[in-house]
Image (spheres, rainbow, N blue to C red):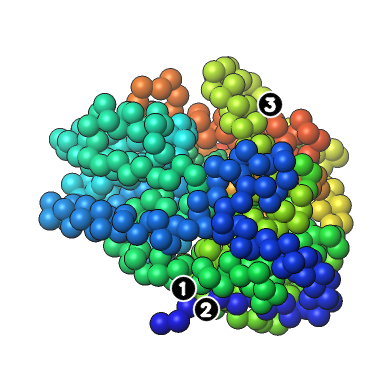
């Protein structure tokens, strides 16, 4: 099968604005230089980081030997009756496998949460049939380490040899690689350290969990290989250059938001993967592209996108889309990686670091070290039924939830955005996602939705480092049954709260408006919040 990936700029004004940028990319031979892994493409300051971050351009070749290893382990596990794969990994260490398996309809349980209820549900699955893939490039990510500890204990309690059920994906020499060795974990896949997390879809990080779960990962490499030459060509027809030029031209014209809707790509949840790539790569130094993933092309924010946003179809062009991108999953991974790296050059930033992610991690750690700060000493500004309100609410403090939300939403300037950050269970509390479209419709502002702490490894970088026009609505909830993290002085619910408060603090310290709604009863509280939003009038 011949692979193709296309980028169509259907908005004529945008196509005109993109043209000079495109011509310059072609005459500067940027695409071929990128394929050749030229670290000077983003300027002097970015050079040293870029020099160890570009091996993704040739993964369709260098990852081939992995396929046999993955298949062998999968066959071995199955012969032992182990056919349920749980993946512990954040951001770049879980988003790609989730899209790959979702697209193929292969079951994979992804743990990228600190919600005790969601982790309890994963633990309640058949452990006799379960293997845990622990994926972390750095080998130090707190969520992933907590899942590993919790599962090791659960396997042991069930009389299962935990070490035989642990499969690790990490960079050579990481603390996790060392631990896996000393604990005698079943298998360690060492990934290419010259690829960053969000560019790692076609490394062991994307391929191992997806392949063990049963996805056809060889096909994915074939798909990427099929478009690699096109994406390397210094030609105005190169779809990656076209996409990069369109995104940068839109940004220059004040449309820094990229609204992504699936328009029939046949891929499940591509936007969630692209979200991290775009936000973490570009959202820094007060600039960048904010990805806004919407439910469908008819959702608010897409066809009615204002001058601050560009509607991008993942799939064929539809009414209201300004740009469309088509191709198979492997092709689109590579297309978007090229496009975002090139857009980074046009935006004048280093697309390979994430300087503001650490701030929230640090604040969360400080709170964990000081349990007093987490133990309910902060008084809510208002308590409205099952919802506690934390944050400045002005006159609305004595009113209804709708009053509180109105005050908050009215504070979002034109051209700004609203970010809903739900530190909840993304399966059991899935109804919270409706808040995105409801708030977008009523506020008339671009609105994003992220599950905490998952988004901290994705849009979290942009929230703190990108354009300073966001307002943040945090939602936290009561935890019914907490889970202790073995060997650590905290539980999952303490960690979850520390992450919410830590990030909230960092955002507030930089002058961003933050409102936290804490649901003392999750179901009733969520219903009240949704109702209150629906009562807002534009
Ligand atoms: O693979 P790791 O090191 O656990 O990191 C997970 C994610 O965390 C981040 O570093 C951001 O916190 C992402 O860039 C990365 O994909």
Q: Is residue 93 above or below residue 375?
A: below
- Marks 1/2: CA distance? 7 Å
Mark 3 or mark 2: name the one nearer the start of the chain. Answer: 2
Give residue 243's position: percent from left, percent from top.
68, 68
Mark 1 or mark 3: name the one nearer the start of the chain. Answer: 1
Element type at mark 3 = loop
Q: Is residue 487 above or below residue 536?
A: above
Q: Residue furthest left?
A: 79
Give residue 227's position: percent from left, percent from top.
51, 72
Taking depth in this image into account, of 529 and 439 the one nearest to the observer is 439
- Marks 1/3: CA distance? 58 Å
Q: Is residue 174 left or right of residue 227?
A: left
Is ligand 1 closer than 8 angstroms to the Cβ of mark 2? no
Mark closer to the observer (1, 3): 1
Give residue 283's position: percent from left, percent from top.
70, 48
Q: In this view, does 330 lie above or below 516?
A: below
Element type at mark 1 = helix
* Quadrant housing the C terminus: bottom right
Taking depth in this image into account, of 139 and 399 the one nearest to the observer is 139
Kindly identify which residue carries mark 3.
379
Q: In this view, does 387 lie to the left or right of 163?
A: right
| Residue 506 shows up from this direction | yes
Mark closer to the observer (3, 2): 2
Kindly identify which residue carries mark 1.
226
């Amino acid at each position: 099968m011949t692979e193709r990936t296309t980028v169509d700029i259907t908005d004529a004004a945008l196509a005109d604005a993109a043209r000079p940028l495109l011509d310059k990319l072609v005459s500067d031979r940027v695409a071929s230089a990128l394929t050749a892994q030229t670290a000077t493409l983003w300027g002097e300051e970015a050079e040293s980081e870029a020099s160890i971050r570009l091996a993704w351009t040739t993964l369709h070749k260098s990852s081939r030997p992995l396929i046999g290893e993955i298949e062998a382990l999968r066959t071995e596990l199955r012969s032992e009756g182990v056919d349920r794969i749980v993946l512990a990994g954040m951001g770049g260490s879980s988003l790609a496998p989730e899209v790959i398996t979702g697209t193929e309809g292969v079951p994979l349980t992804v743990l990228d949460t600190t919600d005790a209820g969601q982790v309890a549900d994963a633990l309640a699955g058949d452990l006799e049939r379960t293997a845990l893939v622990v994926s972390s490039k750095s080998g130090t990510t707190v969520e992933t380490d907590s899942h590993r500890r919790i599962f090791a204990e659960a396997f042991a309690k069930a009389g299962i040899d935990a070490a035989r059920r642990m499969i690790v994906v990490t960079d050579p020499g990481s603390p996790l690689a060392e631990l896996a060795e000393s604990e005698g974990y079943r298998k360690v896949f060492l990934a290419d350290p010259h690829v960053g997390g969000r560019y790692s879809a076609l490394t062991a990080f994307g391929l191992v969990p997806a392949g063990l779960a049963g996805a056809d990962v060889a096909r994915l490499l074939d798909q990427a290989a099929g478009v690699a030459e096109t994406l390397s060509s210094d030609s105005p027809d190169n779809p990656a250059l076209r996409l990069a030029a369109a995104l940068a031209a839109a940004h220059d014209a004040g449309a820094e938001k990229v609204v992504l809707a699936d328009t029939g790509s046949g891929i499940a949840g591509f936007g969630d993967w692209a979200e991290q790539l775009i936000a973490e790569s570009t959202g820094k130094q007060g600039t960048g592209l904010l990805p806004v993933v919407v439910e469908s092309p008819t959702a608010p924010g897409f066809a009615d996108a204002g001058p601050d946003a560009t509607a991008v179809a993942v799939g064929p062009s539809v009414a209201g889309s300004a740009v469309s991108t088509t191709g198979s999953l492997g092709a689109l991974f590579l297309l978007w990686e090229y496009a975002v790296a090139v857009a980074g050059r046009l935006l004048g930033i280093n697309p390979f670091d994430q300087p503001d992610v650490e701030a929230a991690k640090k604040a969360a750690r400080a709170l964990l070290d000081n349990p007093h700060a987490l133990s309910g000493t902060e008084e809510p500004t208002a308590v409205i039924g099952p919802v506690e309100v934390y944050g400045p609410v002005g006159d609305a403090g004595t009113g209804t939830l709708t009053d509180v939300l109105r005050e908050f939403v009215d504070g979002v300037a034109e051209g700004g955005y609203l970010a809903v950050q739900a530190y909840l269970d993304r399966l059991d509390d899935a109804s919270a996602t409706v808040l995105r479209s409801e708030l977008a419709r009523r506020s008339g502002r671009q609105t994003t939705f992220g599950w905490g702490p998952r988004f901290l490894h994705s849009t979290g970088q942009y929230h703190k480092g990108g354009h300073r026009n966001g307002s943040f609505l945090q939602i936290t909830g009561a935890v019914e049954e907490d889970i202790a993290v073995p060997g650590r002085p905290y539980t999952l619910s303490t960690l979850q709260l520390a992450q919410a408060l830590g990030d909230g603090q960092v955002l507030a310290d930089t002058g961003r408006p933050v409102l936290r709604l804490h649901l003392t009863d999750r179901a009733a509280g969520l219903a009240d919040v949704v109702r209150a939003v629906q009562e807002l009038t534009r």
